[in-house]
Amino acid sequence: MKLNTKSRYAVMALADMAVFSTSKAVSLRDISLRQGISLLYLEQIFLKLKKNNIVKSIRGINGGYILSKSPKDIKISEVLLALDQKVKTIGCKKDSKKSCNGKSSKCITHNFWDELDLHINSFFESKKLSDLLKNKESRI
Amino acid sequence: MKLNTKSRYAVMALADMAVFSTSKAVSLRDISLRQGISLLYLEQIFLKLKKNNIVKSIRGINGGYILSKSPKDIKISEVLLALDQKVKTIGCKKDSKKSCNGKSSKCITHNFWDELDLHINSFFESKKLSDLLKNKESRI
DNA sequence: CAAAACTTGACTATTTTAGTCGGGTATATA
DNA sequence: TATATACCCGACTAAAATAGTCAAGTTTTG
Ligand code: FES
Ligand code: FES
């Protein structure tokens, strides 16, 4: 029951950007150094973030990435979606008629996992990148 | 972001038992047939459920397993715990001083994952085996 | 005693994960 | 205009986790 490292690093890198600079481009090299994430891995991650319009890139010397939107408008769910990190605790294919064990009707636990997925997804929907920045004290 | 099949099958098998018989022993063979789960795999799963006192075994012919408690007293969190399925979306070791990226202090996202873990675990804490049995209609 | 059913540890093929590598392209600035 | 910096992108791979299987039992009832 884990998120993959790509998703975790994506969130971490975006949080780093939000803390460090919302206006100037931030280079992956800097993020890599500050957060201790492999530069090569970050490149892979940011490619997806860019495709999903969460960041914009600026090429060339002094280039880097900037957030496409304000941190308070970036939902964590968007970020996870960009990394293909689906929350799918359910065993069966969502659309298919087949159940998770090959039978023809939905299994006895199907609705439960569905409910769980909803519960988790609503958490990610409700959280914004900006929520990560305010620390303990700001949470009432 | 998935549970492993062992956990899913464990919940499914227990739900099957709860539906089918709360008094008489249910053989794994029957569960296997009804739910379409490999018998050999079920054996492995029930060993753990037994060790964690969620089911009791009755050996010999006509033997099988019975639930140790009433379905409304079996929390899903117990079941997952029995299968070593921890909800740990966090990257670092919970107790260690090291952060997920090898730095000495907690990373910028640590509290967020912590909150997520709590959110998911409280779901599993709140749900009982009996909750799986009542279908759609019973949920207001 | 024989068959049904639980007990247990070890073993393995497959899949997923967590990256790395190589070879680009664009652009600011000296 | 050379060059260094930084993004771009697909392909590749070692290692770990997963999902099961297998073998060889033991216990109990009919
Ligand atoms: S989880 Fe959908 S049929 Fe079992
Ligand atoms: S998740 Fe705990 S330090 Fe990063």
Image (tube, coloured by chain):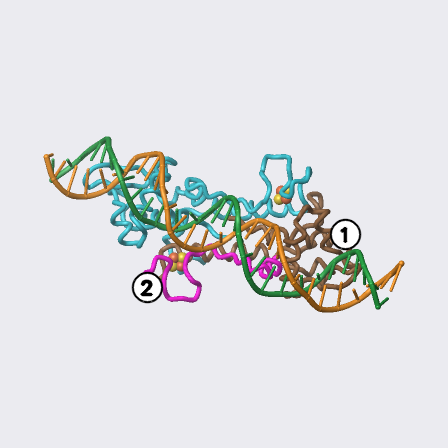
Chain colours: A brown, B cyan, C orange, D green
User: What residue type is disc 1 on?
Assistant: Phe
Residue shown at the point (61%, 35%) measured from the top left? B96
Query: Label 2's element?
Result: loop
Q: Which residue is mark 2?
A: A104
Q: Is residue A3 left or right of residue B138?
A: right
Pinpoint the chain carrying mark 2: A
Kindly tell me whether residue B138 is visible in this rendering. no
The tag earlier along the polypeptide, 1 or 2, is 1
The image position of residue B105, as x and y in percent, is 69, 39
Inspect this view and state whether residue B133 appears: yes
B17 w.r.t. D7: above or below: above
Q: CA distance from mark 1 to mark 2?
A: 53 Å
- The residue that disc 1 covers is A20
Dominant SS in magenta: loop
Which region of the structure is painted magenta? A76-104
Instruction: State the image coordinates of residue A79 (x, y, percent, origin top left).
Output: 62, 59
Q: Residue at x 36, y 36 (%)?
A: B53
- What is the number of callouts on the image? 2
The disc labelled 2 sits on which kind of residue? Ser
User: Residue A14 appears in which quarter of the rendering?
Assistant: bottom right
Secondary structure beneath label 1: helix
Q: Looking at the image, which residue is at 36% across and 64% down?
A: A98
